[in-house]
Amino acid sequence: MKQMKLMQGNEACVEGAIAAGCRFYAGYPITPSAEIAEGCAVRMPQVGGKFIQMEDEIASCAAAIGASAAGVKSMTATSGPGFSLKQENLGYACLTEIPFVLVDVQRAGPSTGLPTSPSQGDVMQARWGTHGDHPAIALSPSTVEECYTLCIKCFNLAEKYRTPVIFLMDEIVGHLRENVEIPEEGEFEIVNRTVPASPAEAGPAYACKNGSLIPEMAPFGHGQRYNVTGLIHAADGFPTNSTEIADAQVKRLVAKIEENLDDILAWEETDLEDAEVCILCYGGTARSAQSAVEALRAEGIRAGIFRPITLWPFPGKRLEEISRKVKKVLVAEHNNGQILLEAERVIKNNCRIDFIGKVDGTVITPDEIVRKVKEA
């Protein structure tokens, strides 16, 4: 029987992770993600999992990677400057193809900024925070219920594509409380990584089989010996200086995401069938946008919402299609214009682009969005 619970966004994230099969959490307390660590400290032992408070954010990320390499679904969570500290190990996981979920509950910055204030200033960091060309998957929830359901999806994508996945929450949603309908066990899909049938049949650790772009992943300690390194490596996992292997490896890492966009991308459209104005927003900002659209339509202004759920990869093709049908796209986000850059790249001259953003630690209100729409 389904349960209805009053939950905080951070709490729902914990429960979603557990439902997805996460059994290891390593973290370091930091506002406004601290409730995730606190929740995991209580819940992980109850489900046979492990919780470790590490000495810092770098070690937290490393521990999650190590647990995943041993075959356990793993998560770490942070905010603000902690996300910056995790970037080196995030890149390591991209190249070694070790899946885990990194939750970033965004707060106002730069540096330690405004620790308890809302922001969406980590969007570009989620895509390009670690160096080099690498795959990136980042999802953004707008409701507490999505903190639960999308956390499950984050784990599914991480396991399926052998890559770290960023759950890009924000303080608005992380500290929000709403009723959440908890799905029954078996109602949602759970994806587990593909492992070799036996050590004898495993073959080279990073060899792809049957045309797949994703190698099987044998857990450490289960019989197959192989090397894991952050250097460019051959199929056996050992470092190489081969330019041909380097080129092929990096291109495969990107291709395993880019060639599966139909499976990865997600977005939501609201009232766009007849819209003249499209409000592009995501995360907690979408809540103000929804109220703004209701107010605008009450006044006869046909407004609608395009909400990317998958921020990375960005659903640019769909936005480009929408931009050919509307007169204006208004980008609303709690930063100085990060997804705005993507919108400008995609839309080009199809329609007018406007922007409303905030970096002062306060929330964009529905009235402010309404006034911005009416300016034109």
Image: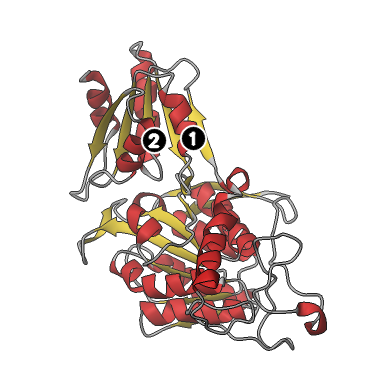
Measured as percent of width and height from the top left, residue 287 is found at 39, 37
Q: Are marks 2 and 1 in contact (CB under 8 Å)?
A: no
What is the number of the mark on residue 317? 1
Q: Is residue 75 visible?
A: no
Position of the C terminus by quadrant: top left
Between residues 115 and 227, which one lies in front from this camera angle?
A: 227
Residue at horizontal 20 percent and vertical 20 percent from the top: 375
| Among the 4 quarters of the image, the one containing residue 89 | bottom left
The residue lying at 42 percent from left, 66 percent from top is 35
Q: Position of residue 32 (x, y in %)?
A: 34, 62
Q: Can residue 106 be seen by looking at this rendering?
A: yes
Q: For the residue carrying disc 2, how many other residues have a C-alpha within 10 Å: few (<14), some (14-19), or many (20+)?
A: some
Task: Name above or below for residue 304 compared with residue 49.
Answer: above
Q: CA distance from mark 2 to mark 1?
A: 8 Å
Is 234 or 7 nearer to us in this picture?
234
Which residue position is annotated with label 2? 346
| Residue at 31% over, 40% down | 340
Q: Position of residue 346 (x, y in %)?
A: 39, 35
Residue sitting nearer the eye, 111 or 96: 96
7 lies left or right of 277: right
Residue at x 53% of width, y 60% of height:
251
Q: Identify which amino acid the numbered label 1 is placed on.
A: Lys
- Whether 18 is drawn above or below 233: the answer is above
Q: Is residue 155 above or below residue 286?
A: below
Q: Amino acid at mark 2?
A: Val
